[in-house]
Image (cartoon, grey):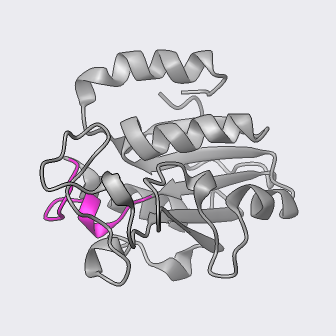
């Protein structure tokens, strides 16, 4: 659980990273996570509160991700088609809009692309490089899904040298029953949960 009130202003060296709160991952989408739409609403409220000076988003943006898509998915390494480039499913879920973010990092064009750190801006700038250029040393991570792309982004954030906190109250999981083990994994890696 989070340790500080989410509305409390964060230091300017901390960025909020909103992971994959997209139509296909919210109720009604092709790979919906229960609670996804509520996450979108709650994240919008946090962004609107002005608690963070720097707020960015990541998006799945699949073109041809190979075996990541399957007609017979195992829901571990393969999934139904989702967040295909140019489709409504890849857009941010309302009330979120791209204009709310300082930058949007698309990932997974030709790969699974779980981590936001695999993403880049339309100009080709990576998430890690962009954050460093803004003087960011810590990131708070939220979004969808806790047990996949939020997890991967948090772990990669630590590997990239950032202090990382996951705002679990602003996430939803594909498999909620696995959250206790996931919390242990993240904590062991140096992520604050």
> At 12% from the left edge and 49% from the top edge, which residue is drawn?
72
Q: Position of residue 155 (x, y in %)?
A: 60, 34
Image vertical order of residue 61 relative to residue 74, above or below: below
Depth order, front residue of 159/63 = 63
Q: Residue furthest front?
A: 66
Q: Quadrant of residue 175?
A: top left
> At 56% from the left edge and 50% from the top edge, which residue is drawn?
7
Image vertical order of residue 66 relative to residue 2, above or below: below
Depth order, front residue of 162/64 = 64
Q: Quadrant of residue 74?
A: top left
Image vertical order of residue 126 relative to residue 153, above or below: below
Residue 93 placement, left or right of 124: left
Q: Main secondary structure of the magenta part?
A: loop
> At 38% from the left edge and 78% from the top edge, which residue is drawn?
85
Span of residues in magenta: 20-33
Residue 94 appears in the rendering? no
Depth order, front residue of 121/45 = 121
The stretch drawn in magenta includes residue 88: no
The stretch drawn in magenta includes residue 30: yes
Q: Position of residue 150 (x, y in %)?
A: 47, 43
> At 17% from the left edge and 59% from the top edge, which residue is drawn?
27
Residue 59 appears in the rendering? yes
Q: Position of residue 71 (x, y in %)?
A: 13, 56
Please state the total of marks drawn on the protein image. 0
Q: Position of residue 193 (x, y in %)?
A: 53, 27
């Amino acid at each position: 659980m989070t340790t500080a009130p989410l509305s409390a202003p964060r230091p300017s060296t901390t960025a909020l990273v909103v992971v994959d709160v997209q139509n296909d991952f919210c109720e009604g989408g092709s790979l919906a996570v229960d609670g996804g739409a509520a996450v979108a609403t709650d994240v919008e409220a946090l962004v609107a509160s002005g608690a963070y000076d720097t707020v960015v988003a990541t998006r799945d943006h699949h073109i041809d991700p190979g075996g990541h898509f399957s007609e017979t998915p195992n829901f571990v390494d393969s999934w139904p088609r989702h967040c295909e480039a140019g489709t409504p499913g890849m857009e941010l879920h309302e009330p979120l809009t791209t204009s709310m973010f300082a930058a949007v990092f698309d990932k997974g064009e030709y790969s699974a692309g779980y981590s936001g750190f695999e993403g880049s801006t339309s100009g080709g700038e990576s998430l890690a490089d962009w954050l460093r250029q803004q003087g960011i040393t810590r990131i708070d991570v939220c979004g969808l899904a806790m047990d996949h792309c939020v997890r991967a982004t948090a772990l990669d954030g630590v590997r990239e040298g950032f202090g990382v906190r996951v705002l679990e109250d602003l996430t939803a999981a594909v498999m909620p029953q696995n959250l206790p083990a996931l919390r242990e994994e993240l904590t062991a890696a140096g992520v604050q949960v």
